[in-house]
Amino acid sequence: AVPHPCARVPTGGGRVEVPRSVTAVRGQDVVLPCRYRAQEQEQVVQVTWLKRGPGTVPAEVAVLNPQHGEHVQEPFVGRVLRHGHGDLEDGAILLRN
């Protein structure tokens, strides 16, 4: 199990819901869930996923933005896909292999 790396910056009083950890099997796909429970009049405008490791600077993995689309950084191109559907309150991603 690894710590869940979902990162969001809410602008209001909603809350981010993620599991404490996600278990992955080497060589298989894994979904990293992340949901924002918005309050009235709130809207998620961007979701940013970061890779964090001990003693390292966090590295951007992917940015999900409804206006500018999805942007995945190298070396994650082809390995990270948006898993959530609809608005960005569901910001889950699929990490392949």
Image (tube, grey):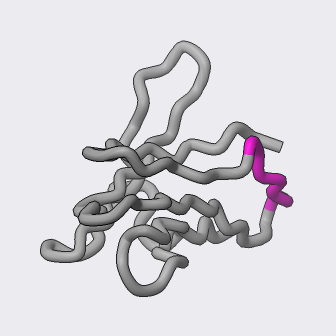
Relative depth, front residue between 78 and 15:
15
What residue is shown at x 30% (from left), y 46% (from top)? 12
What residue is shown at x 53% (from left), y 68% (from top)? 93
Q: Which residue of the protein is positioned furthest toward the top in this rendering?
A: 55
Residue 60 point in image, percent of width and height: 36, 44
**Quadrant location of residue 2?**
top right
Residue 29 point in image, percent of width and height: 72, 71
Image vertical order of residue 52 relative to residue 69, above or below:
above
**Side of 61 relative to 55 (left or right):** left
Q: Quick check: is 59 in the magenta stretch?
A: no
Q: Quick check: is 23 in the magenta stretch?
A: yes
Residue 23 point in image, percent of width and height: 83, 53
Position of the C terminus by quadrant:
bottom right
What residue is shown at x 37% (from left), y 57% (from top)? 62
Relative depth, front residue between 67 and 74:
67
**Side of 64 relative to 75 (left or right):** left
Relative depth, front residue between 74 and 95:
95
**Quadrant location of residue 31?**
bottom right
**Side of 97 relative to 23 (left or right):** left
Image vertical order of residue 33 relative to residue 1, above or below:
below
Give, as a single range, the part of the protein colored magenta.
Answer: 20-26
**Side of 21 relative to 46 (left or right):** right
What residue is shown at x 41% (from left), y 60% (from top)? 38
Position of the N terminus by quadrant:
top right
Q: Which residue of the protein is positioned furthest toward the left in this rendering?
A: 67
| Magenta highlight: main SS | loop
Image vertical order of residue 88 relative to residue 34, above or below:
below
